[in-house]
Image (spheres, grey):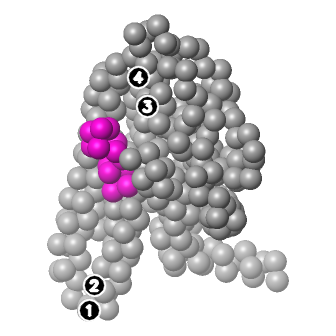
Amino acid sequence: MATDNATAVFEFLLIGISNYPKWKVTFFTLVLITYLSTLFGNGLIIFLIYIDPHLHTPMYFFLTNLSFLDLCYGTNSMPQALVHCFSTHPYLSYRRCLTQMSVSLVLATAECLLLAVMAYDRMIAISNPLRYSMIMNGPVCVWLVATSWGASLVLTAMLIISLPLHFCGANVINHFVCEILSLLELACSDTSLNELMILTTGIFTLLLPFGFVLLSYIRIATTVLRIRSVRGRLKAFSTCGSHLTVVIIFYGAAISMYMKPQSKSSPDQNKFISVLYGALTPMLNPLIYSLRNKDVKGAMRKIMAKRT
């Protein structure tokens, strides 16, 4: 019966904020500010790390990759959300929808893995500083980042290839962008295999990296407690606390969406949860990880001094 009703869909209607017309102006303003902040903050970090030789270290190498991911992630979704906010016909072709979804999955998966790599880097730097330069050498850093990108490409390809090609006459996606769970809701065929693959992928890209990040920060905390200076301990805990806050927002929002039975999920709830990891964390990451850092502040002062 479902097969008989299956039709080829060539474009999708993205509902976005249409269900809440009174919030359109507010939503547009918030997304615009978030996107501009994301562009400025992450672009500034990449620029500063590139021009300052003192920032050519493993930590800032990972931060450069994180900023690049956040730039691409924000650009993949937020401009479209802004354009569609006041559009009377916010349609997206099937190919553009599939492309956007694939890019988002690759970038989000790579960021999940990269955050775990960055936590490992900080753990080694704090708990084993004498061997840090030997453990986290150039080839190792490149290999860790390349593995994160490679694994994200493979896992995304597995999810995209298994997607259903036909939908039951419906082409309405209750989301701001093309998102895999929202797309599966339109499928005619049984999506149990797709949901199982999403759950399995989520274990390796969400639960395991998040658990590793938490364990790394526990190890960092035990090392910090040995610091004799009270001021030094407070500063270290302040830094770790802000890092963990952003990490918990990112992983927590994604886990709450992808690691639960889809029968219990709410489309309206999911699309607003996605704003946390799709828009908020790309804006916060440069502020939390870099712009509060004394080395980055020093690089900014040098540039300002040269221009003056």
Whichever of labels 1 and 3 marks the residue nearer the N terminus, that label is: 3
Disc 4 or disc 1, which is closer to the eye? 4
Q: Relative to 203, does residue 43 appear above or below in the rendering?
A: below
What span is in magenta?
251-265
Q: Position of residue 78 (x, y in %)?
A: 64, 51
Secondary structure, magenta segment, majority class: helix
Whichever of labels 4 and 1 marks the residue nearer the N terminus, that label is: 4
The local secondary structure at tag 2 comes to helix
The local secondary structure at tag 4 comes to helix
Judging depth in this view, the residue of 213 and 25 nearest the camera is 25
Disc 2 or disc 3, which is closer to the eye? 3
Q: Is residue 256 magenta?
A: yes
Q: Looking at the picture, which amino acid does disc 4 mark?
A: Met
The residue labelled by disc 3 is 185
Q: Looking at the picture, which amino acid does disc 1 mark?
A: Val
The local secondary structure at tag 3 comes to loop
Q: Is residue 49 visible?
A: no
Q: Is residue 230 visible?
A: yes
The residue labelled by disc 2 is 233
Disc 1 or disc 3, which is closer to the eye? 3
Left/right of residue 244 with respect to residue 65 in the rendered view: left
The residue labelled by disc 1 is 230
Q: Looking at the picture, which amino acid does disc 3 mark?
A: Glu
Q: Residue at x 28, y 52 (%)?
A: 210
Density class for disc 4 (Cα within 10 Å; few <14, some 14-19, many ≥20) is some
